[in-house]
Amino acid sequence: REAIVASRDYYTGLSHLSAEIGDDFAPLQNEAKHDTALVFLSADNSLYGDIFDKVCSSFLPAIRANPKADVFVVGQLGITLMKTLAPKVPIKEITMSPDFVKSLFDYNHVQLFYGEFKSIAKQESQLRIISANELKPDKMLLSDMEIKLKYLYEPTPTEIASVFAQQIFSGLFQQASSENELAKNASRLMHLDQALTPIDRHLTTDTKKYRT
């Protein structure tokens, strides 16, 4: 927990930088790639309280706002929620794996929805926007556009875009996945604690009854 929370600000800043650089490269983005992917990280069962209900509530408006986006759902709970709440939305049911993360390199923009740990008693839905822009292999166009870019990129915009589209993308995705694991486990502890409270109450009542 400490390692994930301690690195959160770093990865949040890196995510913002990724999105900003993605916007900067938008006029040069590779049109051979798909535009947008929406990804919902959930769990494989429903023993995690209401955290994934919160994530799904954030996910559905994003689908309405991006009707042409490809929709990916990781985890059986998320799949069940989507089939119940948005049965007409075509979804791709995914198992988390390195191959799945690599498949997202084919998109210029990825919106990642997941749970984030705040405290044992509180977990919230979080959105991370990650750019996977890679530049068009058109040197003449790149030369014309470099003077219009917001930042100065060294050694070249193409190489920086490639690093952000793959290496940094993978790191941001993995950290979000770790955040999701932490949030769901904390939510499960709260769920179990809430379930134990009425049991303890009944046991106390029964104990008093049998002692009298």
Image (spheres, rainbow, N blue to C red):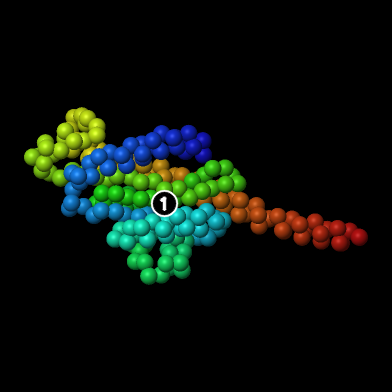
The single residue placed furthest to the bottom in the displayed view is: 88
Image location of residue 151, percent across then percent down: 24, 32
The single residue placed furthest to the right in the displayed view is: 212
From the viewer's perspective, tell me whether residue 71 is left or right of residue 106: right
Image location of residue 126, percent across then percent down: 45, 48
From the viewer's perspective, tell me whether residue 106 is left or right of residue 128: left
Question: What is the quadrant of residue 157 in the picture?
Answer: top left
Q: Is residue 52 visible?
A: no
The residue type indicated by label 1 comes to Phe
Q: Is residue 84 visible?
A: yes
Q: Is residue 201 above or below residue 116?
A: below
Question: What is the quadrant of residue 138 in the picture?
Answer: top left
Q: Which residue is mark 1?
A: 113
The single residue placed furthest to the left in the displayed view is: 140
User: Which quarter of the image is occupied by the C terminus?
Assistant: bottom right
Viewer-proximal residue among 13 and 72: 13
